[in-house]
Image: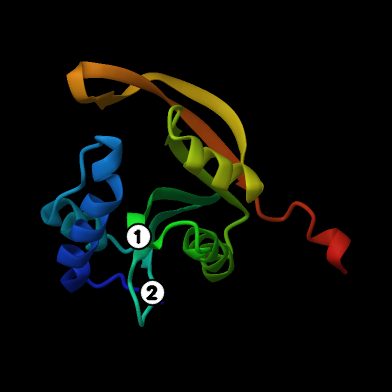
Amino acid sequence: MDIGAITQAPVLAQLHGQAFAMRAERAWSRQEFEALLAQKNIHAFAPVLKPDGFILLQSLPDGAEILTLAVQPAARRQGLARALLAHAFDALGAPKLWLEVAQDNAPARALYAANGFRITGRRSKYYKRAGNLAVDALLMERDIQEGKSDEH
């Protein structure tokens, strides 16, 4: 499921473009994905047999940051984003995960909240939409170790 190879940059750029086209957000280019995937602390995960989405993370000394999570519109609401999150939690073994999400992206915010993320901050007017409309970014965090002691 790890697809960190630079050769996958065109596939990731295409998926990213499809996933974010409806939100009027700028998709990342093949060159941007190539630059990211060339870094040893960047990890990309996607389903092997049917890559309808992917998650891209950056490992940090005290956790990991989700840089983007993209699922094609036709493959949404089928559990893929939740599975990608779960795989990332397990594969990286990071004690904490962070991310930024647009305040107006209700489906993504609901996904992250349902997976234990909580809002910890805000970046005012961080995202630009069509017509130069500015949207805040919500900073979210999840402590992976939370609740693990209760499972034993």
The disc, 2 or 1, on the residue closer to the chain's N-terminal end is 2
Mark 2 or 1, closer to the camera: 1
Q: Quadrant of residue 100?
A: top left
Q: Residue at x 27, y 60 (%)?
A: 39
Above or below, 61 against 132 in this view is: below
The residue carrying mark 1 is 74
Q: Position of residue 151 (x, y in %)?
A: 85, 65
Q: Amino acid at mark 1?
A: Ala
Q: Which mark is residue 30?
A: none
Q: Residue at x 34, y 54 (%)?
A: 73
* Residue sticking out furthest to the bottom: 49
105 lies left or right of 16:
right
Q: Nearer the viewer, residue 145 or 52?
A: 52
Q: Quadrant of residue 70?
A: bottom left
* Residue sticking out furthest to the front: 74
Q: Residue at x 11, y 54 (%)?
A: 31
Q: Nearer the viewer, residue 107 or 124?
A: 107
Q: Residue at x 48, y 64 (%)?
A: 80
Q: Which mark is residue 2?
A: 2
Residue 66 visible from this viewpoint: yes
Structural distance between the alpha carbons of marks 2 and 1 = 23 Å
Name the quarter where the C terminus is drawn.
Answer: bottom right
Q: Amino acid at mark 2?
A: Asp
Q: Tell me the SS state at disc 1.
A: helix
Q: Tell me the SS state at disc 2.
A: loop
